[in-house]
Amino acid sequence: MTFPRPSLQRMTAADLRAMCWLLEQPRAAGRARLARAISRLGDGPLYALLALLLWLLGGVQGERFALAAAFAYGIEVPAFVVLKHLIKRPRPADSLESLCAFIQPADRFSFPSGHTAAAFVMATLLAVLFPLAATPALVFAALVGLSRVLLGVHYPTDIAAGAVLGAACALLGLGLL
């Protein structure tokens, strides 16, 4: 199943307008430096460290967190890879010459955002199992998604899809416990 091309074209046109507004601002390069640092935090090692620490120090809830995270990532990673290769949405800089990416993306396609999906797996698991961490975790996940847009490698709708995918996979992971 792939997106019908007219729907994808309309979505991309709206996304490109947003991207042009964000990335053609005078401070886009300055914001990209901060966005790069936030994006790096969403690369994965931080999540593995968090899961390990919670597993070791978080009691029963920490063990549930680590196990649910393993299940959730076992679902999320293949899902976002399959979706990217089914939908084949080009990256923003590949769609409009006036847009540039401030980093080299790991793959060719943008929909959905894998960084955002991973961040929302963690944020959703923390929100459910450690409610006091919900707000900072969700803010962090949203910042990871925003960083990917500010770096020019994802459209806003890629971020929304990644957030939904990540949250859904986290809930599935919890359901498998």
Image (spheres, grey):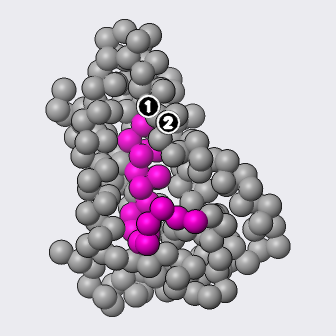
Q: Residues within 10 Å of mark 1 (few under 14, many from 20)?
A: some
- Residue 31, compared with residue 64, is above or below; it is below
Taking the image as drawn, is residue 84 in sight? yes
**What residue is at 47 percent from the left and 26 percent from the top?**
50
**What residue is at 34 percent from the left and 76 percent from the top?**
88
Query: Quarter-wise, where is residue 68 in the image?
Result: top left
Residue 115 falls left or right of residue 97? left
Quadrant of the image for the C terminus? Answer: top left
Q: Which residues are magenta?
A: 104-122
Query: Quarter-wise, where is residue 72 in the image?
Result: top left
Circle 1 sits on which residue? Answer: 48
Magenta span includes 105: yes
Q: Say what amino acid the circle numbered 1 marks.
A: Ala
Circle 2 sits on which residue? Answer: 45
Closer to the camera, 30 or 129? 30
Query: Quarter-wise, where is residue 23 in the image?
Result: bottom right
**What residue is at 54 percent from the left and 77 percent from the top?**
92
- Residue 104, compared with residue 89, is above or below; it is above
